[in-house]
Amino acid sequence: MELMLHVLAVEPTAQVLAKEPIIPFAILLVVILVVPIIFERLRLPGLVGLVLSGILLGRHGWNVFPTETPTMSLLSDIGLVYLMFVAGLEIDLEEFRRKKIPAFGFGSLTFSLPLVVGVFLSRSFGYEWNAAIFIGSIVASHTLLAYPLINRLGVTSNAAVRTTIGATVITNLGALLVLALCLVANSDNLSFWQVLPFFNSLIVYTIVVLIGCHWIGKEFFRRAGDDEGNQFLFVLLSVFLVALVAQFLEIEKIVAAFLAGLAVNEAVGEGPVKEKVVFVGSILFIPIFFVHLGLRIDLPTFFSSLITLQFTILLVVSLFASKFIAAFAAKLLYHYNLQETLTMWSLSLPQVGVTLAAALVGYENGLLSPILLNSVVVLMLVSSIVGSFMTSRFAVGLTASVIKELPFTNQTHIDAGKTDSSPSTIVVPVYNPQTQQYLIEMAALLARQAKNARIIPLAIATAVAHMDAPQLETSIERGERLLLKATALSRVLGVEAQPLLRIDDAFAQGISRAAREQKADLILMGWGKRTGLRARLFGNVIDSVLWSSHCPVAVTRLLESPRKIQRILVPVENFMAPALQPIQFAQILAEANQAQVTVLSVCERRTSSSKIASRRSQLSQIVSNVSSVNPPEIQIIAHENVAQAILQAARLYDLVVLPFVRNRTSPGGLAISDVTTYLARQLTCSIVMLGEPQRTEKSVTVPVGVPSPIPVT
């Protein structure tokens, strides 16, 4: 003990911690867990907190954390590669194709103008051409940091927003290609123009990766079937193999990682494998990269140089001015209104993922000095905070114009193609005898609202190698007992039941396939808890059914008989067409039970009375599209915390209907939020979570009460 105290008294803290790798790793986990939560509560991006934490803990701060250790460097390098891979993986290529002309036009403008301005500014401060071009390129990209906000506002379908999302492909790819050229010129002591022959090989490599990996990925996913584990490993292997080949060709690994993400983008699709890939990087590797970046920042030196301060201020002003000019030029070309132009400007301002990754690589290769690296970090902090704040103000004005374009009907996905809005074929997987009765009762209530409705109680017996195996016989007998009970209960409730026993490889696949074969309108399931690491990484049965089903999935946690439900609460945040689905589901159930539905909207406390009145009018428009004898009530609450407002309001209700939240992020998320699970744990009444099937057109719905993930692409 005395020896340890002596060592601690003599050696610096960072040196002591470096001798025990487990200690800095434990500190890292604490920082990654706590700091983003604190900054989100302050309405600041969590990644800003991670960078500031690195500054405070590093040698230029409190000096309690070793800057360069083998473990830290390895994890940071993996985080850097993972960051760029996720940036490519999360880009919406379908959105780019749909708006390819305006996306290419605005992308070219918002990339080239900051590039030219950055080069001119750098040259005026005496930087050589290669460094000046590099500085211009790293500020030419943009990060969709405010994507969760515009998604919650329901304006992602707006033409200007779609154009900005599509332009991300142009800006990020352009910045990385220029980075690769500048690195080669710097390493061989060549001018920028002398490395143009290298540009040809870079383009060939890009085409080979995009086409080759895309084809290989599709073939592998087609042959791998539903084996998510192998698909997950394939995606990880692809990025590191592409990066390895790039090293032999002297192409920077972050360029290769971004291209790999683009290449496997469509092969992975919007499925559970992509969710898990992003999850693994978002909770560990990418946050470590941001903390490690903060460890390298020397703020005292930065503030001691007047010229550096002047350059940084002018760089920030140049970024804001050039991005605004690009957005205004797009307004003139594509006839956007002023509100849309300002939204495009604010969305294209944040400089986070590609900017920081390129800046760090340039710093490690001698293109950027430590002082210039500080300038880029300051640029990131200012643009991310101000850009997100501006988007929160400008994007709100887009909501009303988008609502006018929505083709509201009395039909939802539950009743697609039917004249009756109630589901006529409901598949009810039965497994737990304790929850089976309430599930069948709810299915009966819903089915009574449709003509010729039927309930299909479904039991799954998982297949084994031999069809005469004792465990399969046991599983079949158990399923038959459950189906007999479900059929008897349906008969008592006066609804036709057609029991179905299916032998399949797994529960989730069996449920999805049976529902498709029976042309089901709804799958009604009991609430399943996540348990264990495998459930978190590879999902449970409900997750898999949600990803693969062709029809809506209602996940229930019923504390009492559905026939006793008299008051139903439906929280609604954005006013897009999908908001009709939980409202209409609740109304169908209410009509069967003579219950009352309340539609709840939560706004900020500082919201003006005129905006509240506009919100009420928009809710009335939505509710008016739900054909009902007893229309839902509308309630608007001003509260600083949406989740807490829902919990307080729900105390007076028997049932809360929520959209199901998949554990996913918006583009390049740094943290994964599962607030639906949080609400489910806190709510003391019954719950129905309505999940819509995956569609060809990407439509990410951030549910009521979900704090924004921290995007980093």
Image (tube, rainbow, N blue to C red):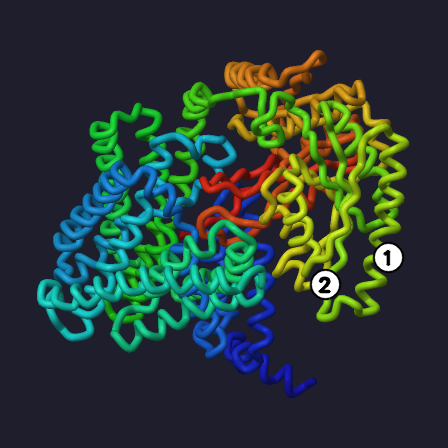
Seen at 61% across and 45% down, the residue is: 549
Q: Position of residue 59 (x, y in %)?
A: 44, 69
Q: Position of residue 124 (x, y in %)?
A: 12, 52
| Alpha carbon distance from label 1 to label 2 | 14 Å
Query: Of the numbered discs in the image, which one, if any, rests on residue 463?
Result: 2
On screen, residue 465 versus residue 382, left or right, reads right
- Return the residue nearer the eye: 484 or 35: 484
Residue, disc 1: 477
**Can the viewer see residue 80 in this picture?**
no
- Return the residue nearer the eye: 70 or 405: 405
On screen, residue 272 versus residue 651, left or right, reads left
Query: Of the numbered discs in the image, which one, if any, rests on residue 174?
Result: none
Seen at 55% across and 30% down, the residue is: 578
Q: Is residue 636 above or below residue 550?
A: above
SS for callout 2: loop
Residue at the extreme bottom of the image, as rendered: 3
Task: Name the quadrant containing residue 616.
Answer: top right
- Return the residue nearer the eye: 491 or 22: 491
Residue at the extreme front of the image, as rendered: 468
First of labels 1, 2 by sequence position: 2
Seen at 16% across and 48% down, the residue is: 116
Q: Position of residue 639 (x, y in %)?
A: 62, 28
- Quadrant that contains the N terminus: bottom right
- Return the residue nearer the eye: 422 or 191: 422
On screen, residue 577 versus residue 534, left or right, reads left
Local crowd size for mark 1, using a 10 Å CA cut-off: few (<14), some (14–19), many (≥20):
few
Q: Amino acid at mark 2?
A: Ala
On screen, residue 560 versus residue 24, left or right, reads right
Q: Position of residue 33 (x, y in %)?
A: 59, 57
